[in-house]
Amino acid sequence: MTHHYLRNNLVNFVVRFIQIIIVFPMAVLLSFYIEPYQSMNYELHFLLCLMAAAAVSVLVTKYSRKLIVLMFVGLLGMFAFNSTFKAQTFEGVYDDYNAMLVNMTSNPHKVSYFKPVRGTYFQNQRVKSAMQATHPKVRDFAVENSTRYFHDEYYRKFGKMTRYFSLFKHIRMNWRYVNDPLGMDYYSPPTESMQLLAGDCDDYAILMASSVMAIGGEARVVISPNHMYTEVKLGHVDDLDKVSYAVRTLFPDEVAGGKIHFHETGEDLWINFDYTADYPGGPFLEPEMYSVISFER
């Protein structure tokens, strides 16, 4: 009798535990497949997905405890084996859950609860979705402005980095900072940003990365505590002197004796292309890196 009672209690505990922990990953999957309605902001969209996931969990558990266990096993299988969700790892779900808890428990400035702290799954997916490196109009924009500055003798001397530097000069020189709509974290697609040449740091980073990639370059987006910017791969660490010489040659007034700022990943050399820098490789606005968003070649 006692053994049967303990067994039932254990089963009930396990089912309730699964019912609770299944909610967040289910909400992640729902937000992945269900697009926000019209101009609905991202945080409200995820909150609705979270509420829907909680309701489904309660209803399924009420209908059949075995079914909720099967759903849990199914979700584990999706995250572990289905290549459709290759950007949705267990670590990413944990980081997003942790980010939500951090924002809810230590949030003196009332930042949106569901805005990731360390650029995890949500922000990564939004940046990747906004990228348009293969869009014909972005390609045209990139080709036109990669040849706008620095005539061909510099291209013969410094190679393809000359084209990236021309893009940097055009976009940065003409960029005007404009805030997002009130209460909304808006990511402008490059086809929009290239016409306006205006927006905030994430709009600039996405346009710059898309443009560099549109002409065959390798770019990535870096998220720091309060900022987002682009870095461009310009060879290996051994090429630093060559890159430094090119920058000082093409941006002599802007450099004015300043240092070349970069990050080293493996043996690769990633140069700062942020609009807050006067030249490629200028000082970082925020040295601390929270997350690096890379893109498939």
Image (cartoon, helix red, strand yellow):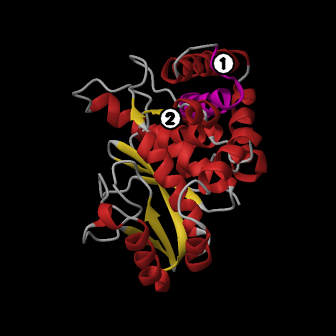
Q: Which quadrant of the structure image shows residue 284?
A: bottom left
User: How far apart in space, not on screen, are marks 1 and 2 (Cα)?
Assistant: 44 Å
> Closer to the N terminus: mark 1 or mark 2?
1
**Residue 130: percent from left, percent from top:** 62, 37
Q: Point out the frontmost of discs 1 and 2.
A: 2
Residue 167 position (above or below residue 153): above
Q: Is residue 158 magenta?
A: no
Could you tell me which residue is drawn at 49 percent across and 23 percent down?
A: 43
- Which secondary structure class fits the magenta region best? helix
Residue span colored magenta = 13-37
252 horizontally vs 125: left or right: left
Tell me the residue that label 2 is attached to: 197
* Residue type at numbered disc 2: Leu
| Mark carried by residue 56 | 1
State which quarter of the image contains the C terminus.
bottom right
Let me know if residue 129 appears in the view. Answer: yes
Could you tell me which residue is drawn at 26 percent across and 69 percent down?
A: 258
In the depicted view, which residue is nearer to us: 80 or 175?
A: 175
**Residue 100: percent from left, percent from top:** 41, 33
